[in-house]
């Protein structure tokens, strides 16, 4: 088991040097791999593995923290009362209606509620 770990560490170190040379070269993975006699897929795979080992995300832009600002509004206590009213049905149910209501919708609601009491 110790030999396996040493081989893995050795391989990782070798690929880390290759990836470092790739990054310094400014070449694409494919071009660099051809020049060095490597398989482009292996180089790409090791580049990803090594980046993840360093806590980086391959191909992703750096994350910039966001600043959030809480927005609040001050409710006008008179605004809710203006135009609002209550309808008391014959069943005793109360319907609170806000200002700017749709009369057709209110009519349908009252019909449904009154039919439900029969």
Image: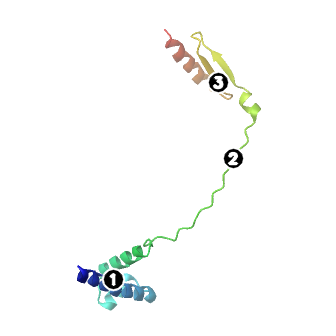
**Callout in the foreground (2, 1):** 1
Real-space Cα distance between discs 3 and 1?
Answer: 71 Å
Where residue 22 appears, as percent x and y from the top left, is 40, 86
User: Considering only order in the chain, which callout, 1 or 3, is on the residue closer to the N terminus?
Assistant: 1
Task: For the N terminus, give its image quadrant.
Answer: bottom left
Q: Which mark is residue 72?
A: 2
**Callout in the foreground (3, 2):** 2
Q: Which mark is residue 114?
A: none
Q: Which mark is residue 12?
A: 1
Real-space Cα distance between discs 3 and 2?
Answer: 25 Å
Q: Secondary structure at mark 1?
A: helix
| Location of residue 78 (image quadrant) | top right
Q: Secondary structure at mark 2?
A: loop
* Within-10-Å neighbours for mark 2: few <14, some 14–19, many 20+: few
| Location of residue 17 (image quadrant) | bottom left
In front: 6, or 51? 6
Give the labeled residue for mark 3.
97
Q: Is residue 86 above or below residue 22?
A: above
């Amino acid at each position: 088991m110790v030999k396996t770990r040493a081989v893995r560490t050795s391989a990782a170190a070798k690929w880390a040097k290759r990836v470092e040379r790739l990054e310094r070269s400014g070449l694409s993975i494919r071009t660099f791999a051809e020049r060095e006699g490597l398989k482009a897929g292996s180089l790409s795979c090791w580049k990803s593995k090594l980046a993840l080992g360093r806590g980086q995300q391959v191909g992703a832009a750096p994350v910039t923290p966001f600043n959030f600002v809480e927005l609040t509004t001050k409710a006008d206590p008179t605004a809710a009362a203006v135009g609002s009213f209550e309808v008391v049905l014959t069943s005793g149910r109360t319907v609170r209606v806000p200002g700017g209501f749709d009369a057709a919708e209110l009519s349908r609601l009252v019909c449904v509620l009154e039919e439900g009491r029969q």
